Structures are given as structure tokens and as C-alpha cells.
Amino acid sequence: MKIVQEAIAGTLESSDLMVKISPDPEQLQVIIKSEVIKQFGDQIKAIVNHELSQLGVTTGLIVIQDKGALDCVIRARVQSAVLRAAKSEALNWEVLL
């Protein structure tokens, strides 16, 4: 999917995270800010990178502000933000697991 506009998903409430995506035609850059980065930073990065790969995102700026979200919440927020940023109308439900 190609990121064509800015998009946000999530909140900054406890146990949630906010995902901000904006277009960057040259590279894929992921920035993660988390209160639990020392304990779960590798897991958060792995989930975000996996979701971006599954959705076919190869360029864009993704900023994650985590407040202790569970893995399933991270997946859902990344998916929502990407679909909004790509203006996706037709969903491939098989990659949204």
C-alpha cells in the first residue's frame, strides 16, 4: 500500500497507543516512543514491522507513541492508520489477522 496522506489511529490513554503516519516517498522510517521501551521495545518493533510488511508498506514516516498497549492493540492501530493513510477502499481481509 502506498501512503498518500497523513493519518492517525489510537489515543494516548493508558494501555493504548497512537499511530501517526505521513507520506515519505524515499524511505520507510519507524519511530517508537514508549513508556515500556526497555522491557518491550523489541516486541513492539517486531509487531509494527510485521504489520507494515503484511500490508505492503515500503515508504512513509510512522510515529508510534505507546502507553503500554497489548500486542493485539498495536496490530489494530497500525492496520487502521495504514488503511486510512492509503485511502484504501477495498480491504484484503486475509492480511488483517
Image (spheres, rainbow, N blue to C red):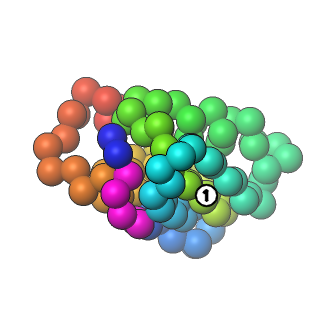
- In the drawing, does residue 14 fall left or right of residue 91? right
Q: In the displayed structure, would residue 10 be above or below residue 28?
A: below
Query: Can you give x and y, in whole percent of width and height, for residue 56 in the image?
Result: 39, 33
Which residue is outermost to the left?
90
| Residue at screen point 40% across, 65% down | 7
Q: In the displayed structure, would residue 71 be above or below residue 37?
A: above
Q: In the displayed structure, would residue 83 be above or below residue 48?
A: below
- In the drawing, does residue 96 fall left or right of residue 39? left
| Crowding at mark 1 (Cα within 10 Å: few <14, some 14-19, many 20+) | many
The image quarter containing residue 48 is top right
Which residue is outermost to the right?
38
- In the drawing, does residue 29 fall left or right of residue 59? right
Residue 6 on the magenta segment: yes
Query: Can you give x and y, in whole percent of width and height, for residue 5 in the image?
Result: 36, 63
Question: How many badges with numbers are in the image?
Answer: 1
Query: Can you give x and y, in whole percent of width and height, for residue 24 in the image?
Result: 50, 54
Say which of 16 and 60 sits in front. 60
Amino acid under disc 1:
Ile
User: In what quadrant of the picture does the N terminus appear?
Assistant: top left
Residue 62 on the magenta segment: no
SS for callout 1: strand
| Residue at screen point 55% across, 55% down | 61
Query: Can you give x and y, in whole percent of width and height, for residue 19 in the image?
Result: 52, 60
Q: Is residue 94 visible?
A: yes
Which residue is outermost to the front?
26
The image quarter containing residue 54 is top left
- Residue at which label 1 appears: 64
| Residue at screen point 55% across, 54% down | 62
| Residue at screen point 75% across, 43% down | 41
Magenta span of residues? 3-7
The image quarter containing residue 94 is top left
